[in-house]
Image (spheres, rainbow, N blue to C red):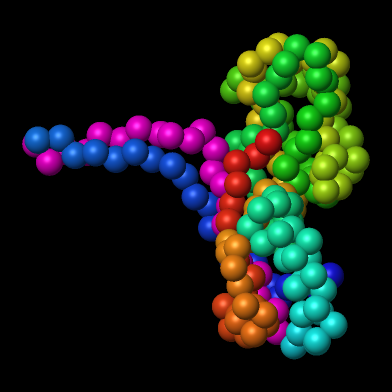
């Protein structure tokens, strides 16, 4: 609160190392298996109390220091979203979304069947995300991903560490609050 104007500007960012060889062809190497999401939230008709709330939230995060989660404002289909890495003991992982449906859960790229392998828990995860609970904890090093329909939860931080209040308030109207996408935990 206050709720930003619809829609958020959500920019998926991948890491690809691109180099050119002598023939002019490109060689590309994927440096990240999953996208991070930069987010810009704009505010129209923001009352002074709303600006104060956002300003205080910015300070509580100590500018760009502390990460937080933000949810997209629209329901979309999301594929290949990172949920976690197995350690052999943990059986519950957050789905990076809330109000999810049509969940497909993968362990090292192999689709798991429900209720044989897992169940979906509504809410209860970090920042109220939905969760997956496996019947047996996934093995150490296994990658858990999900396809789902719902609101995407994105881990971000504020883009700027230094932001004068006048510029902050003005930019909420003109450009929005910019947040840098971070790798999921």
**Left or right of 22: which side holds 157?**
right
Examine the rendered structure and indicate whether residue 92 appears above or below residue 136: below
In this view, the residue in front, 96 or 165, is 165
Q: Which residues are magenta?
A: 23-44
Residue at 62% in and 78% down: 164
Total label count? 0
Q: In the rendered view of the protein, which quadrant contains the C terminus?
A: top right
Magenta includes 33? yes
Examine the rendered structure and indicate whether residue 67 appears above or below residue 109: below
Q: Quadrant of residue 10?
A: bottom right
On the question of residue 116 being in view, the answer is no
Examine the rendered structure and indicate whether residue 153 appears above or below residue 170: above
Q: Looking at the picture, how far across and down is residue 175, in whole percent? A: 57, 78
Residue at 80% in and 78% down: 52
Residue at 12% in and 41% down: 24
Q: Looking at the picture, how far across and down is residue 182, in whole percent? A: 60, 47
In this view, the residue in front, 128 or 146, is 128
On the question of residue 133 being in view, the answer is yes
Examine the rendered structure and indicate whether residue 147 appears above or below residue 162: above
Residue at 84% in and 70% down: 1
Magenta includes 134? no
Q: Quadrant of residue 139?
A: top right
**Left or right of 75: which side holds 47?**
right
In this view, the residue in front, 145 or 165, is 165
Q: In the image as oriented, which residue stretches furthest toward the left?
A: 23
Q: Looking at the picture, how far across and down is residue 91, in whole percent? A: 82, 20
């Amino acid at each position: 609160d206050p709720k930003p104007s619809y829609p958020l500007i959500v920019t998926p960012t991948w890491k690809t190392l691109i180099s050119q060889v002598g023939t002019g062809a490109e060689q590309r190497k994927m440096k990240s298996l999953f996208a991070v999401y930069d987010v810009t939230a704009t505010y129209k008709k923001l009352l002074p109390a709303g600006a104060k709330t956002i300003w205080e939230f910015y300070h509580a995060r100590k500018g760009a220091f502390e990460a937080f989660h933000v949810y997209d404002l629209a329901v979309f289909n999301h594929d290949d979203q990172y949920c976690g890495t197995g350690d052999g003991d943990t059986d519950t992982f957050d789905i990076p979304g809330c109000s999810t449906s049509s969940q497909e859960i993968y362990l090292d790229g192999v689709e798991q069947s429900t209720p044989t392998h897992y169940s979906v828990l509504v809410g209860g995860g970090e920042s109220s995300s939905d969760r997956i609970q496996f019947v047996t904890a996934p093995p150490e090093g296994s990658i858990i991903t999900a396809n789902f329909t719902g609101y995407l939860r994105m881990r971000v931080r504020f883009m700027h560490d230094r932001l004068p209040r006048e510029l902050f308030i003005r930019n909420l109207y003109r450009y929005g609050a910019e947040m840098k996408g971070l790798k999921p935990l």
